[in-house]
Amino acid sequence: MSAIAQVAPAGVSVGEHLAALLDGEFARGLAGFSEQVVWHVPGHGQLAGVHRGREAVLAVLGELLAPTDGRLRIGYRLLSANDPYLVEWLEIGAAGRATGCPVVSRSEAGRIREVWWCGSAGV
């Protein structure tokens, strides 16, 4: 999967910054997230809950990576932008399987401040 859309200039793309983290570009990937980012994952699965801070974002990404031997890929495209909110379609996959869902984010001062992810299902 690859980046499949441009993001509105006013918004900060969750997909773009997660893709950078997965590509090993940690400084660029983390730069998109506020130090106080809040990541909401509904449901009752392993990732469900409210995750606070950049380290929590990395922990969620680590949980997604764990069963894939580091071969997790992400694709994303912009669905809607209404500053400071973005709605993106994220496709996360590995080993020929992918799951897609909408992700809503809110930016503040040029960084992602809050993310609402569609669910806690694994890849």
Image: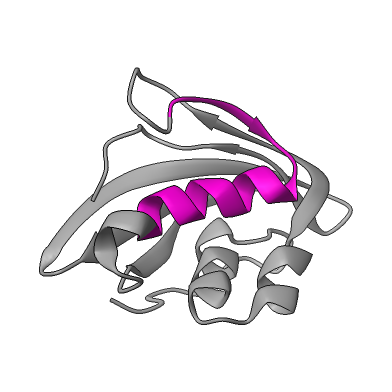
Quarter of the figure with the N terminus: bottom left
Q: Is residue 86 left or right of residue 27?
A: left
Whether residue 97 appears in this view of the structure is: yes
Whether residue 90 appears in this view of the structure is: no
Question: Which of these two is toward me, 40 or 9?
Answer: 40
Q: Is residue 52 magenta?
A: yes
- Outermost residue on the top side: it is 44
Question: Which of these two is toward me, 31 or 47?
Answer: 47
At 68% from the left edge and 60% from the top edge, which residue is drawn? 12
Q: Is residue 108 left or right of residue 44?
A: right
Q: Is residue 121 magenta?
A: no
Q: Position of residue 29 (x, y in %)?
A: 66, 70
Q: Is residue 119 left or right of residue 39?
A: left
To which quarter of the image does residue 68 belong?
bottom left
At 35% from the left edge and 33% from the top edge, which residue is drawn? 120
- Outermost residue on the left side: it is 96
Q: Main secondary structure of the magenta part?
A: helix
Seen in the picture, residue 110 relative to 27 is either above or below; the reply is above
To which quarter of the image does residue 58 belong?
bottom right
Q: Which residues are magenta?
A: 48-65
At 22% from the left edge and 51% from the top edge, which residue is drawn? 99
Q: Position of residue 71 (x, y in %)?
A: 30, 74
At 42% from the left edge and 33% from the top edge, which residue is drawn? 47
